[in-house]
Amino acid sequence: MRVPFIAGNWKMFKTQAEAAAFAEEFKTLYKGTDVQTAVCAPFTDLKLLVDAFRGTGIMVGAQNVHFAENGAYTGEISVSMLEEIGVDFCIVGHSERRQYFGETDETVNLKLKKLFEGSIRPILCVGESLEERDAGQASAIVSRQLASGLDGIGADDIRRLVIAYEPVWAIGTGRTATPEQAEEMCAFIRNTLIEMYDEDTADEVIIQYGGSVKPANATEIMNMDEIDGALVGGASLKAADFMEIIDF
Ligand code: 13P
C-alpha cells in the first residue's frame, strides 16, 4: 500500500539562517507520523537541512537538477552533486520552471532518466493552465506531459516515481481545485499509468495534489481516495502550518 507523502516546496524562499530556524522549530513540532515528510528547498539550504533532519525521518528534496553528468553548464547542478549532499527527492518539471525557465517535456524526460540512474526519487509535476482547463483540455495536456515526460522509462523506475498534479491556476492563487476536481485528475493520472505500464506498477506510484494546500483544506484533500499526498508551497514556509497539514 502507498504511504501518504507530503512535501513542502519552498521555491525561492529562505536563506540558510531562515532554513536553520525553520528546522529547529519543525523538529520540536514533528513527532514522527505515518506520513512521509519532505522539504524541497533552495540548493543553498540543502546540506544544512540534511544535517539538521538526520535521524528524524524528515526528508529533503531539491527543486531542480541538470540532466548531464557534468560539463560546461554555468549555473547548473548535477544529480551526483545532490547525491553527495544526501538529498532524497528532486522536483522535476514544476510549472514555474516550465513557464519561466524553458523547461519542456523533453528536458523533463532527460532529467527523470538521469535521476533514475541514481538514488534520488523524482517528483514530477504535471498540470494544465486555466485556459487549457476552460478549453476542456486538462486531461489532454496532462496525458501529453506524462507520455513525453516518461518516454522510454521502464516500470521498475516508475515504481519510485512521485507525481504531483498541480493545476497552474491553483498555484499561489488561493484558488484550490475542489477535492473532486483534484481527485478526478489524480484518478486520470493513475489510469494513464495503467495504460502506459500495468496495474501493479501504477498502484505503487504516489500521486500528490498541489495548489493552495493549507491547514484549512488539507483534511478534505488528503481524504480523497486517489490522492496520496500533497506538494505544499506557501503553507510549507511556516513550521506550524506545515505540521498542521502533515497532521491532517
Ligand atoms: P502554493 O501551495 O503556494 O499554491 O504552491 C503550490 C506549488 O507550486 C507547490 O509546488
Image (cartoon, rainbow, N blue to C red):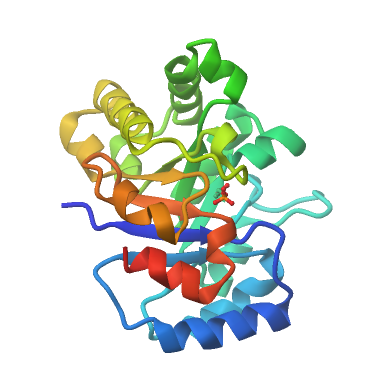
The residue shown at (59%, 67%) is: 237
Left or right of 120, for residue 201:
left
Left or right of 60, for residue 41:
right
The residue shown at (26%, 25%) is: 191
The residue shown at (61%, 61%) is: 10
Query: Residue 95 occupies which quadrant of the picture?
Result: top right
Query: Residue 134 occupies which quadrant of the picture?
Result: top right
- Which of these two is toward me, 109 or 10? 10
The residue shown at (48%, 40%) is: 176
Q: Position of residue 210 (x, y in %)?
A: 47, 45
Left or right of 243, for residue 155:
left
Q: Is residue 24 above or below residue 59?
A: below
Left or right of 193, for residue 168:
right
- Which of these two is toward me, 36 or 134? 134
Q: Position of residue 23 (x, y in %)?
A: 54, 82
- Which of these two is toward me, 129 or 44? 129
Quadrant (top left/top right/bottom left/bottom right) for the C terminus: bottom left
> What number of labels is visible?
0
Q: Position of residue 53 (x, y in %)?
A: 47, 82
Q: Is residue 140 above or below residue 29?
A: above
Q: Is residue 66 visible?
A: yes
Q: Is residue 57 above or below residue 225?
A: below
Q: Position of residue 180 (x, y in %)?
A: 32, 32
Direction top: furthest residue: 135
Q: Is residue 119 visible?
A: no
